[in-house]
Amino acid sequence: TQAAGFQLAEYSATGLGRAYAGEAAMADGADAQWRNPAMLTYLEGTQVSIGAIYVDPNIDIDGTSTSVGGASTTPSNSSDFAHSAVI
């Protein structure tokens, strides 16, 4: 019943550098389609925008697990069990 998550909101490296100020009105690359598809009409020629994000989580668990009704308790320990990934 408990969970953790994160959000990846980086549309482009240039947008991240500007802290996304005015991003809905700037057509500086093909990545503009994520914010405002109408901005693509301002681009010239063929453009490609490629990006990746490397996620390297470090999740450790140290505790106990109790069965339903509390009849038994089992140690629950794990270190860095989440996999890294390129998104």
Image (spheres, rainbow, N blue to C red):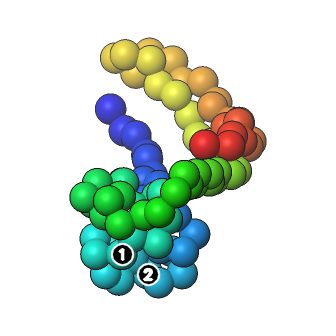
Quarter-wise, where is residue 87 in the image?
top right
**Residue at 57 percent of width and 69 percent of height:** 13
Dot 1 crowding, Cα within 10 Å, few <14, some 14–19, many 20+: some
**Label 2 secondary element:** loop
Q: Nearer the viewer, residue 39 or 13?
A: 39
Q: Is residue 57 above or below residue 67?
A: below
Location of mark 1 (residue): 26
Amino acid type, mark 2: Ala
In the shown orientation, is residue 38 left or right of residue 85?
A: left
- The residue at 64%/30% (across/down) is 75
Q: Position of residue 21 (x, y in %)?
A: 35, 83
User: Which residue is nearer to you in this view: 75 or 20?
Assistant: 20
- Residues packed near mark 2 inside 10 Å, few (<14), some (14 to 19) or many (20 plus): few
Label 1 vs 2, first from the N-terminus: 2
Circle 1 sits in a helix, a strand or a loop, which is it? loop
Give the image location of residue 77, x and y in percent.
Answer: 68, 36
Residue, disc 2 = 19
Q: Which numbered tag is attached to residue 78?
A: none
> Which residue is at 54% across, 81% downward?
17
In this rendering, would 11 be left or right of 76?
A: left
Q: Is residue 86 above or below residue 1?
A: below
User: Mark 1: which amino acid?
Assistant: Met
Residue 52 on image: x %, y %:
64, 51
Give above or below for 82 relative to 4. above
Quadrant containing the N terminus in the rendered view: top left
Q: Is residue 11 visible?
A: no
Q: Which x, y percent locates residue 37?
A: 28, 54
